[in-house]
Amino acid sequence: MLSGQGDPATDLAMFSAALPDALAAFHAKSPTAKDRRALKALSVLLQGYQFLAQAAAFKALPPRKGQSPDAWLSTGDALSDPTTGRDPHPGLASLALMGRAYRAGDAAGFNAALSEHAKWIAQNQPAAARSARVETLFNKATPFVSGMALYLTALLLVFAAWATRREDVAAAARSLAWAAFLVHTLGLLARTVLQGRPPVTNLYSSAVFVGWAAALLGLVSERIHRRGFAASGACAIGFTTLLIAHHLSATGDTMEMMRAVLDSNFWLATHVVAITIGYSSTYLAGMLGIAWVVRRHLPLKPDPEASKALASLAYGVIAFSLLFSFIGTVLGGIWADQSWGRFWGWDPKENGALLIVLWNALILHARWGGYVRERGIMLMAIFGNIIVSLSWFGVNMLGIGLHSYGFMDKAFLWLSAFSALQVAFMALGALPPRFWVANRKDA
């Protein structure tokens, strides 16, 4: 567990015994043969600890009193630097005993050492112990899984309300959608408190936040139009993004340590949140476009007023998205200037953010100039889903650029399928209403 060779507790004792002589030999003006042997003995142990420092899957040693709350160490970190060995971390002994018991298959000994380690953490780092208990409770509660189920149930109720035209069913769908959003919000707040960071810190949390922001915007819009369109979009995006986050969580820890370039609460709370709200609202506009296409072809008696309401709602959401995507992109340039010394470098992620701004602006200008009307604006909104997905996930699959924080080539198939589905909806929307029905004047 510690050096990777023999008994971890014995290795730690050997290291502690060899360190004073090795340090004295290191500073000796005329090293003797004994000094050289002491240095060689320490070097062998240090090689193992340096390997552990690089390969450690987690950091089990909490910060000492007076240190930064983020200064957690792995066993390799604590021992690979000889200067830290002058005052060994007090949690090392219990970890070494856990390693010994694990190798021997001694469950009772392992649990006893674990209890000692937990007791030391509770006494010396009570905040860390409380945080661990809250995180355990959070993981057992699985709020995002519950949120997925509630979003899906609310979406099915919206469909039932459209089919039955009953207001009580529609009211139940809206209430359940708000309940799903409440569970989603509580989970998001819990993650924010546990990390002590703004809500977007990695790809997993961005999926959670994109769904949350889109659901909020959709449910607020639903209170204005009350036709179920915005509620259905909110529930569909909320469910889909939480499902994506659920699959992303299988890749490892979702609350890992921050990368150095992201380790800034100010910019996480401004640039990252603003640009993610831009993602969310663009997706919501695209979902409204898909709803418009479906209503254009499925109902036996199309409702022109409902289609106009959908188009009006999508137009407002696109304007909202343009504002936040533009602000988020500009703030990102300011952050890049402070972090990397340049405002813009044509990085793939920067190009993707710019494309989102330009596409939303193009939709609005095409509408203002009379180049597109109701159908055109809705089909362009659907294509916005592809642009956001490529900017959000596509960059990570490239594995290049300063913003590629999680290479994931396995998502290529799903991203391609999603893009193809959006193109199919656009093609369907370009066809005449209910084109498959024979002998219709509008076919």
Image: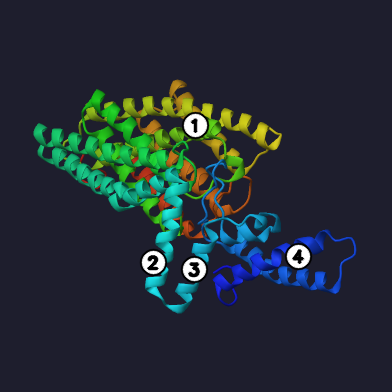
The kind of residue tagged 4 is Ala
Residue 202 visible? The answer is yes
Residue 234: where, in percent of width, then height? 30, 37
> What is the distance, in whole Å, between disc 1 and disc 2 at their CAs?
41 Å
* Circle 1 residue: 269
The kind of residue tagged 2 is Asn
Please state, as top left, top right, bottom left or bottom right, where the N terminus lies in the image.
bottom right
| Label 1: how many Cα within 10 Å (few below 14, some 14–19, many 20+) | some
Q: Which residue reaches farthest top?
A: 368
Query: In this orientation, which residue lies closer to the viewer: 241 or 429?
Result: 241
Cβ–Cβ below 8 Å for labels 1 and 2? no
* Circle 3 residue: 97
Query: In this orientation, which residue lies closer to the viewer: 296 or 259?
Result: 259
Depth check, mark 1 against mark 2: the one in front is 2
> What is the distance, in whole Å, between disc 4 and disc 1 at their CAs?
48 Å
Residue 182's quadrant in the figure? top left
Which numbered disc, 1 or 3, marks the residue that appears first in the sequence?
3
> What is the distance, in whole Å, between disc 3 and disc 2 at their CAs?
10 Å
* Circle 2 residue: 111
Depth check, mark 1 against mark 3: the one in front is 3
Q: Tell me the SS state at disc 2.
A: helix
* Circle 4 residue: 22
Which numbered disc, 3 or 2, marks the residue that appears first in the sequence?
3
Against 250, residue 138 (above or below) is above
